[in-house]
Amino acid sequence: MKILQPPHAHGITGGFLFNRRLADASKGAITVETVEGPALASALQRASREPRFLDSLFLRDPRTVSALEALAPRSWRGVGWLLHSAPTARTLERAAFRVVPGEWMARHLRGAGVRKEITVLVPGVDRAFVRVRERRIARPTTEAPRLLTVANAHPGKGLIEGLRALAALPTPWRWAIAGSWETEPDYARAFEAEARALGVHDRIERLGTVAPDVILRELSSADVFLLPSRFENQSLAVLEAVAAGVPILTTRTGENATWVLDHLTGRLVDAGAGMEDELRAAVGEILADPVTLGRYERNSARAPVPVGTWEQAAQAWIDRFSPGDRRARRADGSSAST
């Protein structure tokens, strides 16, 4: 089977990482192909014997959406959507399959009126993140607490809101951010200007886009994982931080509330108008003193690993959509919901 995705015009997103890790773990059963949006409709009109899944990033381009909506029903046979983000396109009903990485998106789609089958297939997590629990580095109490964020510099990730919340704290801190600063250059410049205006520019380490082993190293020394996103679906970064046993401060969006136990393994705040105030109070609580932080760390270290391996996730896809699966051959998507 094949996942079709647009070029990386929006940076290396969590959805692209999902696609790549799933394909790598499938040992060739799942492949990823990059297709330019204007060429997507033509590609779907060519017959294929294998199921094909369209990454929901295609829905960001109105011209691509219009071209897909104009396709004849036969072009959608064996074609489905892999929905990393919340869609509104009518093409969802025409597709043979609708795959989401968690129950939150399935509920969202059903609430939006989608009546056809929605298949939930959760991602995996590399066991290397679980092993981080065994080698977490104890920070000397004389050093400032260290926060880690894994996200591109983008308005939806709430980095400026997180910056303002941290800057208001009376206690010292350090913040490492792993992710691209080139996805939204204007936002990256606004973040830099805000950090300088607040006088905390030198407390922030901009790691840029880094390899997985760097993320593992950073998680092993992080006191808190911070992700103040305005929207999440199934955040791979949150899953990996949970697996690593790091306390998490994030927003109550998508699947975050499934994995983060508020006041036990981390804090959840609403992603609305009062997010900055809630972030300030929540991070102030977690970092209030070594005893409180230690309680969050012990709870996080004992929390169950949220999902299986990527190999198990890939096998679930193969079991569900292999050519021998009767449901995978149906083009109307009307079988019972998974």
Image: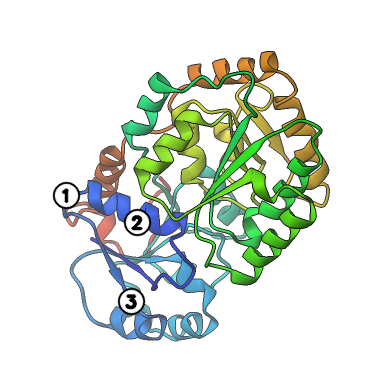
* Quarter the N terminus occupies: bottom left
Report the disc number at residue 27.
1
First in sequence: mark 2 vs mark 3: 2
Q: Is residue 225 left or right of residue 269?
A: left
Q: Residue at x 50, y 60 (%)?
A: 180
Q: x, y (%) of residue 210?
A: 41, 51
Report the disc number at residue 19.
2
Residue 156 placement: quadrant = bottom right
Image position of 225 with respect to 328: above or below: above
Q: Residue at x 48, y 57 (%)?
A: 84
Disc 1 residue type?
Lys
Report the disc number at residue 35.
3
Image position of 47 with respect to 178: above or below: below
Q: Secondary structure at mark 1?
A: loop
Residue 70 placement: quadrant = bottom left
Image position of 97 with respect to 311: above or below: below
